[in-house]
Amino acid sequence: MPSVLESICMIVVFGQFLVGVFANGFIGLVNCIEWVKTRRVTPIDFILTGLAIARIGTLWALMIMTFFAFLYFKRNFINNWTHSEVIWNISNHSSAWFGTCLSIFYFLKIANFSHPAFLWLKWRINKVVLRMLMGCLLISLVIILPVMERITKMQLIPSGQENGINISYNVQRLKTLQFSASILLNTGGLIPFALSVVSCFLLVLSLWRHTRKMHLKVIGSRDPNTEAHVRAMKCMISFLFLFVVYHLGLAIGVLNVFIFHCKLLAILSAIIMNVYPMTHSIILILGHSKLRQAFLRGLRKLPQHPWGSLSGRG
């Protein structure tokens, strides 16, 4: 029987799942409605929608894996390569690259440098970001799918007709391959993380040069360019911080699968990992004017809501 603490943690995981799916679904819905109205897809809307879809896939996969770990942990469910893990790996890599391309887009759109290479990229920002995104996603699939296919085939090797020595040997090979695959697939997040760090650093450098040029001495007297820099930096820094938190939870989960074998630790790792796709999407809604205004309009339409009554009086 699950303990009280494990049950409470599962309720937290389910709450994170609902909030995360709602936030990311809202981002995708608003952008899709905008596409239908204008019949025009902007690069930023494409990136945000792709990011939202990838994070919904991540949240679903994490929820399914955590649910089965909660119910069937003692039956070695965690040691099996499931369909939810396939979805999680693909959506995990997609989410990392969409988030990185969002950071690069903000950098190229807002930063000010006179270097010819930067100007060339800035003039071709739409093509550069989208081509980079598609290329990285394709490379990720080329790496992920063969590894998962090999593990799936190895799972079919142990059978009741073999002797105990062969079964034990095959199981050990499977665990070793799974651990190696986990390290290989998860270290793939280092590349998008490094690109996001470089983009954030260059944006900070651009802001520093801009403020020196403008000679701003009063804190409240920011020009629109400075405000744009600050908003983009907040989004990028929050992405980097939550990305680190996510991989910290991921590291705990991987170590738990192969070393600790603790059900509570598996659920806690899911709680830590869910913070990233849930919280960063909320930050994007609050920081993006179109999404924020759409969210406030939705709140005003809710019955018996303070904003609705205030707007009705006005």
Image (cartoon, grey):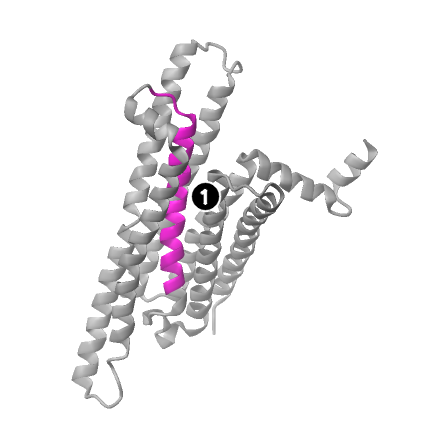
Nearer the observer, 248 or 34: 34
Q: Does residue 163 sit above or below 208 in this rendering?
A: below
Give residue 158's position: percent from left, percent from top: 24, 81
- Residue drawn at (34%, 74%) of the image: 76
Nearer the observer, 11 or 130: 130
Q: Residue furthest front?
A: 39
- Residue drawn at (63%, 36%) of the image: 293
Nearer the observer, 88 or 117: 117
Give residue 98's position: percent from left, percent from top: 40, 45
Tally the marks.
1
- Name which residue type carries label 1: Ile
Asked if residue 32 shows in the view, the reply is yes
Q: Quadrant of the C terminus?
A: top right
Give residue 269's position: percent from left, percent from top: 39, 56
Asked if residue 251 shows in the view, the reply is no
- Residue drawn at (41%, 63%) of the image: 264
- Residue drawn at (29%, 52%) of the image: 139
Q: Does residue 56 sit above or below 257 in this rendering?
A: above
The residue beneath circle 1 is 47
Q: Is residue 103 magenta?
A: yes
Magenta: main secondary structure:
helix
Q: Determine the image quadrant of residue 58.
A: bottom left
In-image side of 111 versus 286 (left or right): left
Q: Which residues are magenta?
A: 86-113
Q: Residue furthest right?
A: 313
What is the secondary structure assignment of the residue under circle 1?
helix
Q: Determine the image quadrant of residue 106.
A: top left
Q: Determine the image quadrant of residue 310.
A: top right
Q: Is residue 16 magenta?
A: no
Pointer 1 local density, CA inside 10 Å: few below 14, some 14–19, many at least 20:
many
